Amino acid sequence: MKFFKKLFSLAVTIIIIIAIINYKKISNYIVNNYIYNKYATIEITKGEYSKEIDYGFVQITDDFIAKNYKHILNIVYTILDSGNDTFSFYCDENYKNCLNDVDNLISENGSSILSDINNYVHPYYTYKNIVITTNSLGKVTVTLEKQYTKEEIEYINSELDKITAVTEKDKNNEQDKILAFHDYIINHTKYDIERADNMNSPIFKDSQTHTAYGLLHEKKSLCGGYSDILSIYLHRLNIPNYRISDNNHVWNLVKMDTWKHLDATWDDPVTNTGEDILLHDYFLISTKELKNNDNIEHQFNENVYLEAK
């Protein structure tokens, strides 16, 4: 009797082991032959303001099965650049550290990389909030709340039509057009020093002077508004550009004959007398000139903004 009990127990154990092995095989089959292969055939849709430009730090990809950390950054950049509000990609089965790398990316330390990638896309596709979630199968979903609403984009585009009808009149080359637009924005905008000095005050909770919409609507702006409106205009001219930033400031990097810095914020200085001043100290200058002018508020990560080296 004891012999049969042991034999039965052994048989049950073997059956359980076989079931576990088969379950793993079935699970792997589903993941490898259904989930991954199915998702790999999906193409991302591109929006009206998608740039589809490769840079030194990030490049557009059509492969949404992440192979390494660099590939994750490229996928996130592609999602942002596309204008989609949500999109999912998967970790390659051989990329064992994938979910850990995603977790590091969305951590407090890694969030600065997401902000840097945000600078590379058209301002209309930048995010106000980003949420990245994962599951045990290696699915990664990116969900975005955009900085600009449809109504705000329509307003900005309408205002730019009016402005450029004035600034581009009799202008025959791109640099003259940029200069005229730069001067117009500065002459019709004041730096929002009151908000800058009280960033956490509830008084300014509804202010949008950090955006191009706020700049045009309120006639006041922080550096984010200046850099966004210049970037939007440069895109209208089909001139490659992106925003470049340090911890406290953001400005523009523009591809002319070479990559040049453009900082309308610092060309619109705040004075003790309240006098309006228009400068051109930061108009399409080299990185060497930028550092000679100011090497404190214009520091940036040269491992990220490679075109500015």
Image (tube, rainbow, N blue to C red):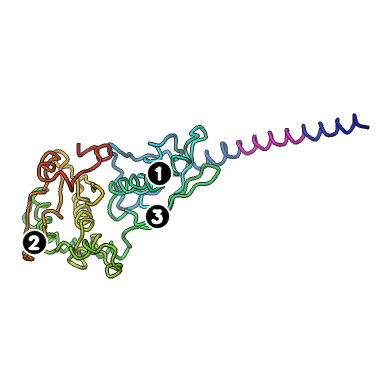
Q: How crowded is mark 3: few (under 14 residues within 10 Å), some or many (20 or more)?
A: many
Residue 250 spot, x, y in % from top left:
22, 51
| Amino acid carrying mark 2 in the image | Thr
Disc 1 target residue: 105
Alpha carbons under labels 3 and 1: distance apart: 15 Å
Q: Are marks 3 and 1 in contact (CB under 8 Å)?
A: no
Q: Are marks 2 and 1 in contact (CB under 8 Å)?
A: no
Mark 3 or mark 1, earlier in chain: 1
Tell me which secondary structure the magenta stretch mostly adopts.
Answer: helix
Look at 65% across and 37% down and name the residue there: 26
Q: What stretch is highlighted in magenta?
A: 15-28
Residue 266 spot, x, y in % from top left:
13, 53
Quarter placement of the C terminus: top left
Mark 2 or mark 1, earlier in chain: 1
Residue 113 quadrant: top left
Disc 3 target residue: 144
Q: Residues within 10 Å of mark 2 (few under 14, many from 20)?
A: few
| Amino acid carrying mark 1 in the image | Leu
Look at 47% across and 46% down and name the residue there: 140
Q: Regarding mark 3 in the picture, which secondary structure is present there?
A: strand
Mark 2 or mark 3, earlier in chain: 3
Observer-side mark, 2 or 3, equals 2
Q: Do the residues labelled 2 and 3 touch (CB within 8 Å)?
A: no
Residue 154 quadrant: bottom left
Q: Residue 271 got which mark?
A: 2
